[in-house]
Image: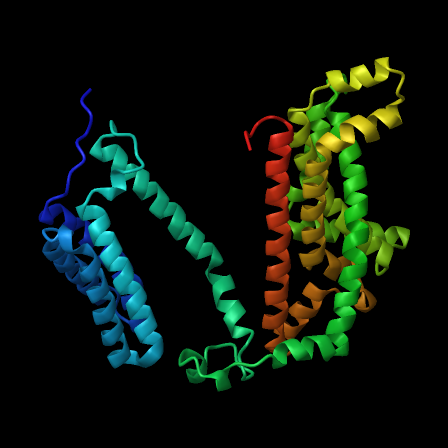
Amino acid sequence: MALTPVENQTPGFTAATAAAAGAFFGLFVGTAQGSGLMGVLIGAALLGVIGFVFASMTDKETPLRWLLIAVFAAAGFVLGGVVAAVIGALFGWFAGWFVFWIATSRYRAHLAPYLTPGQVLWHYTFRVICGVIFVFLITPILVVMPLSFNAQDFFTFTPEMLRFDPEGYSLKHYRDFFTNDDWQQALWNSVRIAPMATLLSVGFGTLAAIGLSQPHVPFRRAIMAILISPMIVPLIISAAGMYFFYSRIGLQGTYLGVVLAHAALGIPFVIITVTATLVGFDRSLTRAAANMGAGPVTTFFRVQMPLILPGVISGGLFAFITSFDEVVVVLFVGSAGQKTLPWQMFIGLREQISPTILAVATILVVISIALLTTVEMLRRRSERLRGMSPS
């Protein structure tokens, strides 16, 4: 099969592709302004014309891209001030980059030369779909974080914030969180409960994963399904069951009851991550240690644990996040004395709308991002230890 030639695209192809991108972005802009159809038409026409004109002037790419940035920034400033100017400059930069990226066929630079046009189209369509899903998932975070710096007690962007006026921003909601007794008591409860639940989850989950990894254990699949069921069963059902069970044995409304409940929710994460780590574990190492006279405990801590430690820590981090962010179960099995941070946030939404919730949510998001980054680093380290990654 002949290789697909890589050459500059025709103005018609560039214009059509640029118009499709313009319609996509115009849909969002137009919807925000109250007319999605008008946004699609204007976006498609605008980028289509730019693509058609610039496709035949690829030798002047740099000045034309700067021209687009300046024109869109100026138009944004006239229509909406500094904020619109910044958005316009960003859109101008994207439009210039995208048009010349298509016109000069740079989109094929990192692809196999034998791919058909249909395969190239699907390659980028799939990535656009993934990008749209990603933006849809993180949009709530992108909204909450700037709102936490609102100088007013509102859950919306004020005109001062939209103008980037320093008077519209403040740290007063963060100060309220760190000085309010209710918030600090809730934080202290979460800090007390989550580490204890994590330790129990890691201990029991690691032992269960190691035991279930042994081929001679009967009914391994059934036991595994039971142990990870807290991840599958709706939380409201688990919480109701725990409430009735704990009330019978006197654990309802106690710290121990909340810790045990959160540990039960975290154990499945530890089992799954440790089991995944054990898949590539070389069992001849434990047999060699036993032949050298090491006992089971020594073999576990000196041979097995160092190799599965990334999976154990990853599971522990997931268990910690689950406990720290959980609200449904603690509402059932806890009492006012065990009010955690998510519980206090729930009360703040239900009883009194306090913007301090946004500051707390931002702090929790930052903590979650840091922990998930650690999990990813541990995952890569585990792959290197097991020889699945070259570096």
**Corner quadrant of residue 25:** bottom left
Against 194, is 169 above or below?
Answer: below
Q: Residue at x 64, y 24 (%)?
A: 280
> From this viewpoint, which residue is outermost toward the top?
291
Q: Is residue 314 left or right of residue 100?
A: right
Q: Nearer the viewer, residue 377 or 158?
A: 377
Q: Is residue 326 visible?
A: no
Q: Is residue 162 left or right of residue 96?
A: right
* Residue 347, percent from left and from top: 67, 71
**Corner quadrant of residue 148:** bottom right
Q: Is residue 95 visible?
A: yes
The C terminus: image quadrant: top right
Q: Residue at x 21, y 42 (%)?
A: 105
* Residue 152, percent from left and from top: 54, 84
* Residue 334, percent from left and from top: 79, 61
Against 294, is 58 above or below?
Answer: below
Q: Residue at x 48, y 77 (%)?
A: 156
* Residue 311, percent from left and from top: 68, 37
> From this viewpoint, which residue is outermost toward the bottom?
167
Against 114, is 367 above or below?
Answer: below
Q: Is residue 380 left or right of residue 38?
A: right
Against 141, is 110 above or below?
Answer: above
Q: Nearer the viewer, residue 146 or 94?
A: 94
Q: Residue at x 61, y 71 (%)?
A: 359
The N terminus: image quadrant: top left
Q: Nearer the viewer, residue 202 or 68?
A: 68
Colouring method of the image: rainbow
Q: Is residue 316 left or right of residue 370?
A: right
